[in-house]
Amino acid sequence: MSRFRKTPVRAVPSLNTTALPDLIFTLLFFFMLVTNMRTVPVLTQYQLPSAAELQQLKDKSLLVWIMVGNKEEMQLNSDLCTFDELPALLDGIKSEINPDEFSKITAVLKIDKNTPMGTVNDIRQILRAKNILTVYYAAEKLF
C-alpha cells in the first residue's frame, strides 16, 4: 500500500453551447428591427440624364430628395408637391433639424432629362433662398 491516497481526477465540465445559435439569431433579429432603413419611395416617373463621370455621396445624412418627373410632377422626399408648395415644405424640413446642422443639408435632384433648364434653375433659386447650398444631381453612368 502506498502512503499517498489517490484522489479521483475531476473532469472539467464542458461548456454547453446549445443555446448560443438561438442567442445570436435573437440579437440579429433585434438589430434588424431597430435599425432605421430609410428609403424614399419614388412617386414620379423620370428618366435620368447620362454622364461620363459620376461621384457617390459620402455623407448620406441630412439629405433632401427632390424628384421632378417627365410630366413636371414634383416630389420632395416621400411627398408629392407642387412647385409653389416647395418653399413651405423645405421650411418644414428645416424646422425639424437642429440649427447647428443647417449647413450640412444636402439636396439631391433627380430630374427627368427632358425637363426644361428653367425649372431646374427655379428649384436651385428656391434652395439658395432657403440656404441649402449643397446640391447634387443624379445621373446614369454612360458605358
Image: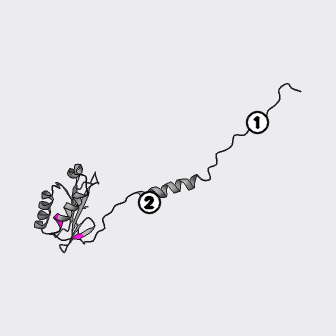
Q: Is residue 46 visible?
A: no
Is 24 in front, or is 115?
24
Instruction: Look at 40% across and 57% down and name the residue there.
Output: 35
Identity of the residue furthest to the right in this view: 1
Toward which corner of the image does residue 64 lie, by quadrant?
bottom left
Q: Is residue 82 magenta?
A: yes
Q: Is residue 27 visible?
A: yes
> Which numbered dot is residue 99?
none
Mark 1 lies on residue: 9
Q: Badge 1: how crowded within 10 Å, few (<14), some, or many (20+)?
A: few
Stretch in magenta: 80-87
Instruction: Look at 27% across and 54% down and name the residue there.
Output: 57
| Residue 56 picture location, percent across and down | 27, 54
> Which numbered dot is residue 33?
2
| Residue 68 picture location, percent across and down | 20, 68
Q: Nearer the viewer, mark 2 or mark 1?
A: 2
Quarter of the image where the N terminus is located: top right
Instruction: Look at 58% across and 52% down and name the residue there.
Output: 20
Q: Is residue 29 magenta?
A: no
Q: Secondary structure at mark 1?
A: loop
Give the amino acid at mark 1.
Val
Is 23 in front, or is 87?
87
| Residue 55 picture location, percent across and down | 24, 54
Give the amino acid at mark 2.
Leu
Is 94 in front, or is 132?
94
Q: Which mark is first along the chain, 1 or 2?
A: 1
Query: Are the two marked residues, 2 and 1, in contact with CB atoms closer than 8 angstroms?
Result: no
| Residue 106 picture location, percent across and down | 22, 55
Identity of the residue furthest to the top in this view: 3
Instruction: Look at 85% across and 24% down and name the residue there.
Output: 3
